[in-house]
Image (spheres, rainbow, N blue to C red):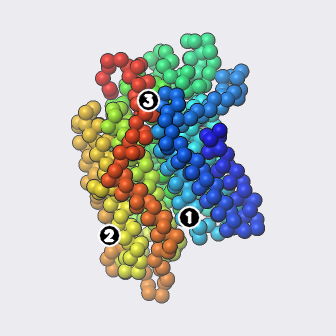
Amino acid sequence: MILVLLLVLPLAGGAAAWIAARRSPLAARWISLGALGLDLVLAASLWTRSPAEGSWLVRVDLSWIPELGIGFRLGVDGLSLLLIVLTLGLGILSVAASWTEIRERVGFFHFNLLWILAGILGVFLALDLVLFYFFWELMLVPMYFLIGIWGHERRIYAAIKFFLFTQASGLLMLVSILGLALAHRGATGELTFAYDALLGTDLEAGLARWLFLGFFVAFAVKLPAVPFHTWLPDAHTEAPTAGSVVLAGLLLKTGAYGLLRFGVPLFPTAARELAPVALILGAVGILYGGALAFAQTDLKRLVAYTSVAHLGFVLVGIFAWNRLALQGAVLQMICHGLSTGALFILVGAVQERLHTRDLDKLGGLWKRAPRMGAAATIFAMASLGLPGLGNFVAEILVLVGAFRVTPTWTAIAATGLVVATVYSLWIVQRAFHGPLEIPDEISFPDLGAREIAVFAVMTLALVWLGLYPQPVLETAREGLAAAETAVHAALPGELWP
């Protein structure tokens, strides 16, 4: 029951941290670290397993509500395993990064953080569409509290906006889930929400388009794709550091995973028809997000807009739908989580020390905190796609794969690499170089041992992915191959898109 334990440990750890914080806030932090650390060990133990059934390393299939065809169905393959490890790794780093930032209601903070992570893990594990929707919504409420209680100046506005966007789009997905199950019952006489059973359901073309659109909008909002992205800058900017890391590194990836696992395989014909539009939206998002990032004076909002640009590469890779592009999309999901998550931790460290994110009030920080300046340079270089770091490999794979499908829009998307260079260097130049803007009497300590350890782990991961990404690509191979097989079985001999 290792998959059940993967879900139970963060849920139980969050509850235990909330209770323990009544006596000691420090105990809540250590309990959270312990629960996530043990969960990471369990997840890592799956890495050496060979697939037991198809591409699945482990599966759970238990009866839940048999009258409605709803089961407690979980499964993990190489694709979901990579994202589970990313979730637990960034979860641990988020707890460490907020060690001194969160001083009020510490127990409830860690309760919400771990329950968000449990919801994300459930999304990556669920093989029943009702169960998938349950975990999709489970992420929503604790993140609302995380932003609304521990956020910054406009936290209530940002929390409500986040809730409305994600809840409304989630309801569209729920309608599509019900429509797909009913259509399957009409074709086979069986009511079920099992992922395997619903693959290959014979749908009338018009119905397939509408059902796919419900899934696509839900996943595009969470990704986020232009023009569904407007909730993201506010949520990122107002969230506490851990909230921003989880949003950028993990919640956005649930949208990409949803498209890879559910959206395209369940509706291959409709996805192929929409692919040209999605490719254009991805390319536009790369340039639009980069341009808006460069226009910001709030350092955290600048980093937030870079996510729109980086996830544009993921959207292009998914809808190019060939092996190279899909591998690039998966690698980009992981590398973006590390590099942008690190930048949010860095911005959080600056704000904790100076209580400002305004670039006009920053400058020359390298003179006071050279270790922080070096860390900022490393992660800015990763963000712009410097060779030797993971983001470069991911973006090149996406572009090479997409060029086979749409040379014009791939060329347009490639100019996003130039835009990324501008806004990434802008971060380093405005905040860490130039004249020193902080008066000498204001204390600005450099990175401590805990912060150095966090950044060292993220740096080593990005360097490893940049120099030797093959183990990650091999791990994802079986899961991606299964998704490709499901699509090509429905579209025999037809070109994509």
Label 3 vs 2, first from the N-terminus: 2
- Say which residue label 3 marks: 483
Relative to residue 30, is residue 328 drawn left or right? left
Provide the secondary structure element on which disc 2 rests: helix
Q: Residues within 10 Å of mark 1 (few under 14, many from 20)?
A: many
Q: Position of residue 235 (x, y in %)?
A: 52, 54
Figure quadrant of the C terminus:
top left
In percent of the image, x 60 and y 50: which residue is there? 39
Q: CB under 8 Å between callouts 2 and 1?
A: no
Relative to residue 332, is residue 200 drawn left or right? right
Q: Position of residue 493 (x, y in %)?
A: 32, 18
Q: Position of residue 406 (x, y in %)?
A: 26, 34
Q: CB under 8 Å between callouts 3 and 1?
A: no
Q: Name which residue type carries label 3.
A: Ala
Closer to the camera, 388 or 119? 388
- Say which residue label 2 marks: 429
Q: Is residue 84 above or below residue 16?
A: above
Q: Name which residue type carries label 1.
A: Ala
